[in-house]
Amino acid sequence: MKKTFFIILFCALSVVAQNKDDATKNPSSSTPRIVFLGDSLTEGYGVKKENSYPAIIEKSLKEQGYKINFTNASVSGSTTASLMSRLKWQLNNKPDIILIALGANDGLRGFKVNVIKKNLSEAIELAQQNNIKVLLAGMQMPPNYGKTYTKKFKQIFPDLAKKHNVKLIPFLLKGVAGDKSMNQSDGIHPNEEGHKKMAQTVLPYLKEVL
């Protein structure tokens, strides 16, 4: 009886040790992989890479003891039309969390709200089918686009968050949009101070998902 017990115990300890070795050899198996899919706002247009809000967030999380694999796969000028192809490409890296921060360029170009919504919805569904958690960043249009369009555009994001049960950042540019001290001379792209503010906005939501 004792001999059988020690044999079982030895086997169990061997499995634990093997799993520990595997985790050491393959850190990604136990380390969340986070991918940001956005446009110039998230890529960090006009500021040094280390001063973009995704880089600030990555640094902050690591300083707080989080072990993460972080990729900023944002591309300036991109719209929601490219989201599906970019997401499919990222699936090869097996991300655990994806932050989607797209739609601003669609809105500025006056794209139809139902098309923007469809593009985002399909990407969220694909992510969820692959067991990827989604964090959705809300966007808004300036008032000169008219009350009807700005209202419908703003509603895209809470509607999708509710439909797909994903975490929503109500407005990515909260405290930044329209503030000259937070933006570059073009009045559109955040400066270093703006990116610090964006990092403060996004970080609590990302930590909830983590």
Image (cartoon, rainbow, N blue to C red):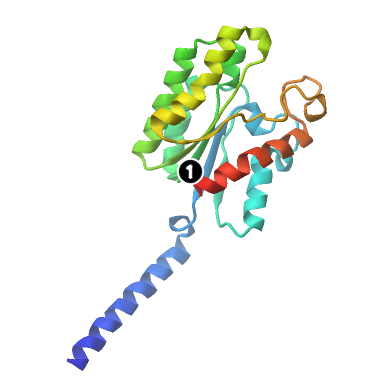
Residue at image position (62%, 6%) is: 146
Where residue 174 appears, x then y in whole percent? 67, 30
Residue at 36% of width from left, 40% of height from top? 130
The amino acid type of the residue labelled 1 equals Ile
**SS class, disc 1:** strand
Residue 67 lies, in percent from the top left, at 56, 57
- Above or below, comparing residue 73 to residue 94 in the picture: above
Q: Residue furthest left?
A: 1
Residue 70 position in % (x across, y down): 57, 47
- Res 128 → quadrant: top left
Q: Position of residue 172 (x, y in %)?
A: 62, 31
> Between residues 37 and 204, which one lies in front from this camera angle?
204
Viewer-proximal residue among 184 and 89: 184
Report the number of numbered marks: 1
- In the shown orientation, is residue 137 left or right of residue 125? right
**Residue under the image location 60 percent in, 27 percent down:** 39
Q: How crowded is mark 1: few (under 14 residues within 10 Å), some or many (20 or more)?
A: many
Q: In this view, does 179 lie above or below 51?
A: above
Whether residue 59 is situated above or below residue 1 in the rendered picture: above
Q: Decide: is 31 above or below 104.
A: below
Residue positioned most to the bottom: 2
Quarter of the image where the N terminus is located = bottom left
Tell me which residue sits at (69%, 33%) in the image.
Answer: 44
**Tag 1 residue:** 97
- Left or right: residue 85 compared with residue 2: right
The part of the image, by quadrant, that contains residue 71 is: top right
